[in-house]
Image: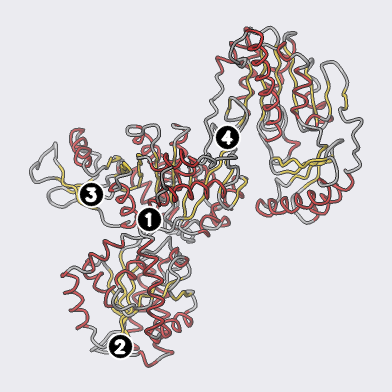
Amino acid sequence: MPKKTALDESADLRLQVVSLSRNDSFAGAVEQPQNKRDELKKRVRIIAVTHFLPFAVSVSEETPNEPYQWNVTRRRGHTAMYAGIRSLIENPGTDCMQMGWIGYYQDLSGNEHTCDSLSHESRCNIVKALEEYHAVPVFIDKDDAHGHYEGYSKQILWPLFHYMSWSDSHPVQPNWWNSYNKVNKLFATALTSIYNAGDIVWVHDYHLLLLPELIRSMYPLATIGFFLHSPFPSSELFRSLPHRKDILNGMLGSTSIGFQTYSYARHFLSSCTRVLGLESTPTGIDNKGSMVSIGVFPIGIDSKSVQKRSSLSSVQTKMKSLREMFANKLIIIGRDRLDEVAGIRQKLEAFERLLEMYPKYQNKVVLIQVTQPGQTRQPKLEAKISELVTSINSNYGSLEFMPVLYHHTFLDADEYMALLNIADLCLITVIRDGMNTGSLEYVVCQQDKHSPLILSEFTGTAGSVSGAIQINPWDYEAVAQAIDTAFSMSPEERTVRYEQMFKHVMSHDAQYWANSFIEDLRAIVLAGQTNAATPCLDLALIAREFREAKRRLIMLDYDGTLTPITNIPAQALPPPEMLVALQRLCADPRNLVCVISGRDRQFLDLHLGAVKGLALSGEHGSFIRYPGGEWISLLDQVDLGWKDEVLSIFEFFTERTAGSTIEAKETSITWHFRNADPEYGEFQAKECMSHLEDSVVSKLPVEILVGKKCLEVRPISVNKGEIVKRLMGAHPEQWDFVACAGDDKTDEDMFRALRTMQRSIGQKHANANDELPQEPQHYFTITVGPVDKKSAAAWHVTSSNKIVETLIELAATE
């Protein structure tokens, strides 16, 4: 046997970690790691989708008139994200393409224009010019681009994700959401021109939150990764977003969703629970039967590139000039966008407090604050910062020296690198930030000086850079004390702290981030976290089989199958068209139709009893009523003495869980928590289940059924599968058409029972005719849910409405 390489061991470990850490992993997913390890090492094609391409185009001097030829240059900003994607392009094990908006182009005079007016040939030339950069452009017209980016993304999503309220000076425009929706659809359409089966699609950031679901609707089996570079707000704040469900459902189209920190992931999980009512674990969300993986992948920087840049002679020249300019001064460097969340005001307030509390630093310390334009223009913030700078310089400065140098514009890259190299302290006081890669660049540039880093605890970086001094930017006095501590730190402590930070930044760079996300995504797929597709019900096929059959059996669940799930169970009433279809089906003597529900007998009699010829089964198989007959209890000999003990436990939790209710049936008891606080309800359900398992299930012949926002305790001998066996009879081959539909875990018992019978019939036929086993094709097990829902059913429909439509179609079949 060949010896395992380090890559082999890494692949095995990743597969095992993914399988064991996710709920609902398939048993034995890593029993044979060799094949899956080989799959993980295979060359893969990745399509990285970002709002902007990392390139800009300008008209070539060779073509002053259309059709234009183009010059391609790199775009400023998002350096960490683009560096990670670029590492995938340069990786020989991947074939990576980039897709995004090309933005505005520059004419020969340097003026910017939208691509709306360009001829088709000029646009084609843009596509050709970007091919050598592995880039595919998306063209967006001016109005939609403005509504999507300047409107909904900047004015709604960015403030919300950074814990800012929407400004009254920028009222919400209805067309912003329409533009946001339209642009996401444009990206989805553009993707169809390059997508091939087996590709990995990696979508980035809040500009494209709807895109994963749009891709999923076109390619149900696609492997889709999504990474959010910004924070994700708490559920209390996110719930204020008018289109909150659309946003969450859009993201949940992904196979895996990545966040910068666990707190952002936790907020997202909470929002899915509270807004959509979905069940979740720390590592995933059950999205209607499909498990969406949730992971934490802190982004890094292109540390080698920063190292190389900082060693350039032009940077060294700038460093020498700056040292002469600030000779004998302690330099504090800060670089931020001019936004409220950047904490520039807090930084200046804390710096003023430093000079007030520690006079020894007056005329000794200079704060060089560099700002660049923020997401939106904020005149009030600009005025306040200007006022603070003036105040500090007036109170603690002189004609020869100003303690604050405020530089409000884009800084030359060489000057920025030089400042990071000569600084005695980097001060970052952001009040909300996705990652803040500036702190990582500072660490790389401090190889010689080992100067300290003061970092706000509200940055995404705070959890990774353990050697930094962490502060609360709102506590000005504590920030001032932290600055004094940093300046007073011994050389030995500086070195220890710096080596911790440097080791992390160099090992967890942008390449590591990108590779980790892609490898984890591939491991999730290979370890069985995504499921084989359940095909959509073929209406023509089921209608043909039904029409040709002489004896037909139709078995149907009620809640979630014939009617949608409702918060109040009593409101789940049968639609009139469904009752008409059932009556027509039951009137045909060739058909036996049975509704197999968890509801009690009284409910079923009230709402379905008028359908002549309809068989009914209540309380998950405890009772059955054949057409024209009376209710028969299947549990006459079963001891129900356990009900009082279970009822007392449910009453205990009901008193302590607002919104929860108890439904006492003849043979079972159900505790509903659909209307309770989603997270607290889930917590109480787990506590209640644990209590039941210890005090009831372990000593009595009962089982706990975990349903949709409910716990049901019932006799262990009861389930819907037993009713299926009873209806099929001793000779199941008598039926030449069988259809069974359901939506939740209780209905899987029916599907499994039918699958067993189907195989048994196939084996009997094979033995009788000396042939290979072949299962009969007239069995239709149908689950209500998404295409990748885990189910024993052979077919799926997306909603209960589709089941009703199918019944209407069959009822109309002659």
**Quarter holding residue 135:** top left
Quadrant location of the N terminus? Answer: top left
Mark 2 to mark 1 CA distance (whole Å): 45 Å
Contact (Cβ within 8 Å) of mark 2 with mark 1: no
Closer to viewer: mark 2 or mark 1 = 1
Mark 4 to mark 1 CA distance (whole Å): 32 Å
Quadrant location of the C terminus? Answer: top right
- Residue identifier under label 1: 512
Q: Is residue 155 left or right of residue 610?
A: left
Tag 3 secondary structure = strand
Mark 3 to mark 4 CA distance (whole Å): 42 Å
Closer to viewer: mark 3 or mark 4 = 4
Closer to viewer: mark 3 or mark 2 = 3
Q: Amino acid at mark 1?
A: Tyr
- Residue identifier under label 4: 789
Q: Nearer the viewer, residue 217 or 767?
A: 767
**Quarter holding residue 315:** bottom left
- Residue identifier under label 2: 397
- Residue identifier under label 3: 56
Tag 1 secondary structure = helix
